[in-house]
Image (cartoon, grey):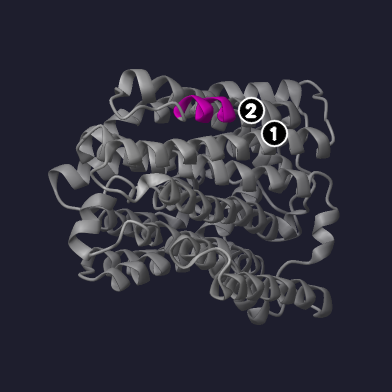
Amino acid sequence: MSTVNPRRWWALLVLATAQFMVIMDTSIIGVALPEMQRDLGFSQGDLQWVFNAYVIAFGGLLLLGGRLSDLLGARRIFVSGWTVLIAGSVVAAAATTAWVEVLGRAVQGVGGALIAPASMTLLMMLFSHDPRELGKALALYGAAAPAGGTAGVFLGGVFTEWASWPWVFIIYIPIGVATLLATGLLPSVASRRGAIDVLGAASVTAGLALAVFAVVRAPEVGWGTGQTVLELIGAAVLLGLFLVIQRSIKAPLMPLGVWRTPGLAPSNLAMTLLGAAWIPMWYFLNLYLQQVLGYGAFASGAALLPMTGLLMLFMTVVTARLLGRFGPKPLIVGGLFVLAAGLLWLAAVEPTGTFVVDALPASLVAALGMSLAYIPAMMAAMSGVPQEQAGLASGIVNTTYQVGSALGLAALTALATSQGAGELGDLSALTDGFSAAFLAAAAIAATGGLLTALLMRGSRSTHGKAHEPTARPQNESVTT
């Protein structure tokens, strides 16, 4: 039987740091984008591929990462993921052309897709002996994700302002090496037999990539053109093929029966729409601060630092207590509607506005909504899943969030561009485009709140033990 790991809280620090860094990789480039655009020759519309190349590889391969983690051992996949992430960081930092930069970001995404589900599997192994400890560990681990996303904005500003944009990638090299040196704290589990669904992984990744590509290119070539229509049909066919493969083979990448787990489907839907609203918010808020208000890279990153503090405070102190008292549904619903309110406020930005009036209060409201919804949605998605499928469940919930982020950013970038955000130097046109994106993101968040209220079954707390994960230690030898 498994024994309690005496160094589990130190191990959690390693896992939370990994989660922080993986998610920070989606945001640290935000403030550096204008500098990268000038140096590497990106157009305003294609600039988002610096973000989406990472997210597509990350989101598209998370299910495969989860399966590999379950079969080959989570610590082994964790180490492999960091090795790949370091390699991608080297490529991205050394890039002198746009396509090499996009390639480096995609390699980073592959590394992240291995790290994220392995981290969740290791966390479940370390803490599933005690539901209270597991809840606390999940709260700390969950807080690392949005905190990493927002902190990346600030750190990106520091590196871009006082060094140069390649440093937003160079920073991953020493941190990655330090993390690899600390993996001895993590539990080791023997691999087990099982097939790897390579065809399923290829079809779902290609389908997601083609869908995002179609949405990104649509404003340029036209939504009703044969090219866009064929690309969207091709994406639908590939994703449909993925489902057929999962139903027909013996060892699918994503056993469809897992969706019978109570709460899994509505919580993942909530995560999809949460990502589709939150990620475009910080992306366009960055551009508003720099391209309209004239902030430099460091000032722009520092301006968004209050969101990081609010996220960390609420996720580690407030949200965990509210979750134990009320259960996940009220927090997810309330959080999404609060996020929608903050985004609606941001939609009122002015070309002659100020940070204190136009951005700060609204961004804090949005961050409050995110901090209320994220951890409850993650815990609802993981709850009820047996430990042997922890990697799969983690891969699914991370995939839905990242897919929502990529598709949301692609769609809202297309909308913003069509409303004037492509007109660099025209402050009124830029503001109109960003405002349209904020308004659409508010609608996405509100839709998420409404659908969660309708589809998710309520749960009541029982002295702080509401919605406990049912995962239990397996008959495996867990060592350090």
Q: Is residue 353 above or below residue 384?
A: above
| In the image: residue 80, left or right of residue 175 | right
Residue at (43%, 42%) from the top-left corner?
149
Q: Is residue 76 visible?
A: no
Tell me the distance, in whole angstroms, between the alpha carbons under discs 1 and 2: 6 Å
Q: Earlier in the sequence, mark 1 or mark 2?
A: 2
Given residues 347 and 459, the one toward you in this image is 347
Residue of label 2: 337
Residue 449, numbered circle:
1
Residue 343 among magenta residues: yes
Whole-percent x, y for residue 341 in the image? 56, 25
Residue at (35%, 31%) from the top-left corner?
304
Q: Is residue 52 above or below residue 34?
A: below
Given residues 83 and 145, the one toward you in this image is 145
Q: Examine the image and state in which quarter residue 204 appears.
A: bottom right
Residue 437, numbered circle:
none
Magenta residue span: 339-346
